[in-house]
Image (cartoon, helix red, strand yellow):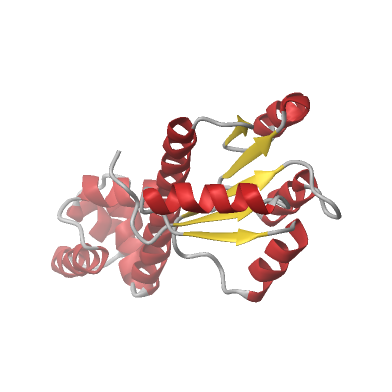
Amino acid sequence: MEPVSNATVYIVDDDAGVREALAWLLRSRRLPSESFDSAEAFDAALQSRPAQRQPCCLLLDVRMPGMSGLALFDLLIVRGDLATMPVIFLTGHADVPTAVDAVKRGAFDFCEKPFSDNALVDRIEQALAKSAAHLAALRERSDLQVRLADLTERERDVMDLVVEGLPNKLIADQLDISVRTVEVHRARVFDKMQVKSAVELANLLRQGH
């Protein structure tokens, strides 16, 4: 798998030894990381920053003093952060059933301590790829909205009928304008939406929903 660029792995664990070992492992694989000794510290850092725009994932201990990993996980669910920041739980043997339940509720995976370095890094890279794909889809949707906003009302009318598959003559009749005017609007729609055909336009609009 190609490494994801500009990615960050967040480590949240109250055990300093675990944090240091994970940070060292990630450095050895050229994966930048940030470590936090509590769920509260990570949550505070998250709240103080702008919305996540780079790929990331979260290595999260299940049991910690104060706010538990599960409580933090529930917060991330409520905020809708899991798609941008997939969560991999780090669990002791006793916490495996809890971690399995968390996976059913949207966690990316869990790794039982002591974990296999290679298996953990593989899952981290897959989580980062999922985060990158979600962020790319968000950017595409945002770009589509910008393009749509640039259309005039008449261009939107023509676009809707083009997508329905109507030929220029029928569009002209329906909108009570000349075929030449339809051709001009159609060309402008294709130019603004950066497509070359009605099929391409329909596919673009379908992906945006």
* 54 vs 2: above or below: below
Locate residue 14 relative to residue 146 in the image: left or right: right
Which residue is at the far right?
66
**How far across and how far down the image is residue 40, in percent?**
77, 62
**How far across and how far down the image is residue 50, in percent?**
57, 74
Specify whether residue 81 is in view: no
Q: Depth check: 194 or 15 in front? A: 15
Image quadrant containing the N terminus: top left
Q: Depth check: 189 or 57 in front? A: 57
Locate residue 172 relative to residue 129 in the image: left or right: left
**How far across and how far down the image is residue 199, in percent?**
23, 45
Locate residue 144 relative to residue 162 in the image: left or right: right
Residue found at x 64% / y 32%: 113
**How far across and how far down the image is residue 130, in percent?**
44, 44
Q: Depth check: 168 or 139 in front? A: 139
Residue found at x 37% / y 48%: 29
Locate residue 36 relative to residue 190 in the image: left or right: right
Question: Can you tell which quarter of the image residue 126 is in?
Answer: top left
Q: So how many labels did they put on this image?
A: 0
Specify whether residue 61 is in view: yes
Question: Can you tell which quarter of the image residue 102 is in?
Answer: top right
